[in-house]
Image (cartoon, grey):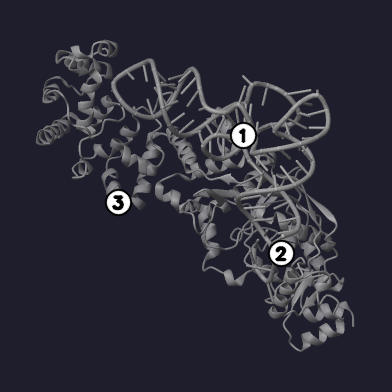
RNA sequence: GGCCUGUUGGUGAAGCGGUUAACACGUCGCCCUCUCAAGGCGAUAUUCAUGGGUCCAAGUCCCAUACAGGUCACCA
């Protein structure tokens, strides 16, 4: 009886591992091209954290002329989510993110779903058993629990290693007998490591990190025949010819296991890059952004707010590479794809997620869009999230587009819109249906002078054909004739000589039309709204103010 | 508890042995102006968690302490 007999008993029907080595040859790519991957569990949706990780993988591969693929890590059948894979792929599609190889598209290195690669893992596990580098372990849950308690009591390191690894030196005969008796077992690595030895992780982002060598006999094949993460990682990233493993830094501490696995299997180790986690403030403490607890984690949260996907990507790029922001400001005509992402500009500690910053990026983004584009996207947004507004804008694209164009096609465009939902907040008063609602009181409507003369202004002076200059000159003349100061300095020097400032006069018009004292350019608003309707709104205004 | 990482202003951060400690967001002034937004100008860290050490010179290197985070599964 030898290792071969044991291996054949455990894995009678798997191919020799060399078969797979030949099936998945080295990729022929140019020097320096990175092969990266994003490898999520099929949880059903993409969240900020996974977007951040996938973004890094995507950009580095793309920009080096390499390959990036999507691999679904579904080896935990307990965590299976219905349509989990479809959900992830759908989310990436919506975000317009695509991988060179994925479960739908396929590719030469597939399958790209781990549960479909069972035999591949088993083939390599078999190889290890034959070589005496792995063994079946019959420890029960109870046994492992006792082991742990004993170690805690003796203040020993916890785990299945060295002399604690009870089944490590079981004779082949005994093992075969137990298997034939249908005793449940799993396959463990027979770790050749020594905890007192030091190994070094040369991380692309974090630099050199010294850690103890792995000496744990970790599980490589579970009782359901599927591999653990560690083993699947080694086998897959070798066979898929990954050059750079870019993943969250919660994996740093398992690097010793991975290094050892690559060695034992005779694989060339890939480079590693461990990304700092996205964090969030909860009260005074900072913790990892949680896909379950934090609303900011869900992509749908931004969709509901009306924040474009491009903005999310810009924000992610901003956190990902410390010099991206400056570059983007200096190169406002370029896109994310034009920026060269590098490991050495990625953060080492956690990156605090800042919604305020994201909004500011969004405003800049919107200020560069064409009015017609904003209209179209706002329409799309409203269709899904705001039916009332959708109905108001769907039949008259030009009206909203004109509004959006106010102070837009100039060197320094307005920056007050940061989301599709802001469009309504900005211009609601230009829609009579919204204006008519009861809950829109005029802001600060007490004036120390008779305001009814603005009716005179609109009836007799205001002409919607005027140019902006003509319009303003007329406003000034009229206001002046009623006793308002036209010159700011003059007014400041002798406020008592005047009824008010020209700004005060304009604010009556502004409040009349918008209810508020702040708005975009008056001339444009009046013109777009139209004189006929203005007169009606004016009556309502005077009526309401006199009542109040 | 073991192992690993981090700690720079209100916030995110740059910084890689010699800089007036970038930049962005925010906040506050002033200017411009029909309001707001934008824009312009200026103010916002005598100091880089604390304590030692090395060096002519330290935010930057070393050691301790404190605090924060990660990880120690038949989960990924």
Q: Residue A323 carries which label?
A: 1
> Which quadrant is the N terminus of chain A positioned in?
bottom right
* Horizontal and vertical percent position of residue A164: 80, 73
Please tell me which residue is depicted at 58% across the width and 60% down the height of the picture: A104
Task: State how far apart marks 2 and 1 are (Cα).
Answer: 35 Å
Q: What element carries label 3?
A: helix
Name the residue carrying label 3.
A387
Give whichever of discs 2 and 1 has the lower sequence position: 2
Q: In which quarter of the image is residue A336?
A: top right
Image vertical order of residue A233 relative to residue A489, above or below: below
Closer-to-camera residue (A533/A149): A149
Image vertical order of residue A163 relative to residue A468, above or below: below
Task: State how far apart marks 2 and 3 are (Cα).
Answer: 48 Å
Q: Which of marks 2 and 1 is in front?
A: 1
Q: In which quarter of the image is residue A542?
A: top left
Name the residue carrying label 2.
A232
Task: State how far apart marks 1 and 3 are (Cα).
Answer: 41 Å
* Horizontal and vertical percent position of residue A494: 24, 11
Please tell me which residue is depicted at 75% across the width and 42% down the height of the picture: A32
Q: How crowded is mark 3: few (under 14 residues within 10 Å), some or many (20 or more)?
A: few
* Horizontal and vertical percent position of residue B72: 70, 64
* Horizontal and vertical percent position of residue A257: 77, 61
Q: Residue A391 carries which label?
A: none
């Amino acid at each position: 009886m030898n290792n071969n007999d044991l291996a054949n008993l455990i894995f009678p029907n798997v191919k020799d591992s060399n078969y797979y080595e030949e099936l998945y040859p080295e990729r022929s790519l140019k020097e320096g091209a990175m092969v990266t991957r994003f490898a999520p569990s099929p949880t059903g949706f993409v969240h900020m954290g996974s977007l951040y990780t996938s973004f890094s993988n995507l950009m580095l591969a793309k920009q080096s002329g390499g390959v990036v693929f999507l691999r679904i890590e579904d080896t935990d059948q307990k965590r299976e989510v219905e349509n989990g894979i479809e959900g992830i792929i759908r989310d990436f599609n919506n975000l317009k993110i695509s991988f060179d190889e994925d479960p739908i598209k396929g590719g030469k290195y597939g399958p790209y779903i781990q549960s479909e690669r069972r035999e591949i893992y088993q083939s390599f596990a078999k190889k290890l058993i034959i070589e005496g580098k792995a063994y079946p372990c019959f420890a029960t849950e109870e046994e492992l629990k006792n082991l742990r308690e004993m170690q805690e009591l003796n203040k020993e390191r916890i785990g299945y290693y060295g002399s604690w690894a009870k089944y490590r030196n079981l004779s082949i005969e005994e093992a075969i007998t137990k298997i034939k008796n249908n005793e449940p077992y799993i396959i463990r690595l027979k770790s050749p490591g020594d905890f007192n030895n030091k190994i070094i992780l040369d991380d692309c982002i974090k630099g050199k990190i010294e850690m103890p060598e792995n000496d744990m006999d970790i599980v490589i094949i579970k009782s359901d025949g599927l591999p653990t993460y560690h083993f699947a990682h080694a086998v897959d990233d070798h066979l898929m010819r990954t050059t750079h493993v870019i993943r969250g830094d919660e994996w740093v501490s398992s690097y010793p296991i991975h290094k050892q696995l690559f060695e034992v299997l005779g694989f060339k180790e890939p480079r590693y890059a461990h990304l700092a986690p996205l964090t969030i403030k909860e009260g005074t403490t900072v913790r990892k952004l949680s896909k379950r607890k934090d609303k900011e984690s869900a992509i749908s949260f931004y969709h509901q707010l009306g924040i474009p996907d491009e903005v999310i990507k810009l924000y992610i790029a901003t956190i990902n590479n410390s010099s991206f922001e400056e570059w983007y400001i200096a190169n406002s005509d370029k896109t994310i794809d034009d920026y060269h992402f590098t490991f050495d500009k990625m953060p080492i500690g956690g990156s605090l997620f800042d919604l305020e910053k994201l909004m500011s990026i969004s405003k800049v983004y919107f200020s560069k869009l064409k009015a017609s584009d904003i209209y179209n996207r706002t329409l799309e947004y409203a269709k899904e999230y705001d039916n009332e507004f959708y109905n108001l804008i769907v039949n008259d694209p030009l009206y909203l587009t004109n509004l959006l164009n106010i102070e837009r096609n100039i060197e320094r465009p307005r920056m007050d819109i940061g989301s599709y939902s802001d469009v309504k907040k900005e211009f609601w008063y230009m829609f009579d249906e919204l204006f008519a609602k009861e809950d829109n009181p005029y802001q600060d409507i007490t004036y120390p002078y008779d305001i009814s003369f603005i009716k005179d202004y609109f009836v007799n002076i205001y002409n919607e054909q005027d140019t902006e200059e003509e319009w303003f000159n007329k406003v000034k003349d009229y206001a002046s004739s009623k006793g308002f100061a036209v010159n700011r300095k003059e007014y400041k020097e002798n406020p008592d000589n005047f009824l008010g400032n020209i700004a005060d006069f304009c604010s009556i018009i502004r409040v009349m039309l918008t209810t508020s004292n702040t708005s975009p350019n008056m001339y444009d608003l009046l013109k777009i709204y139209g004189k006929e309707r203005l007169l009606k709104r004016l009556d309502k205004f005077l009526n309401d103010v006199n009542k109040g």
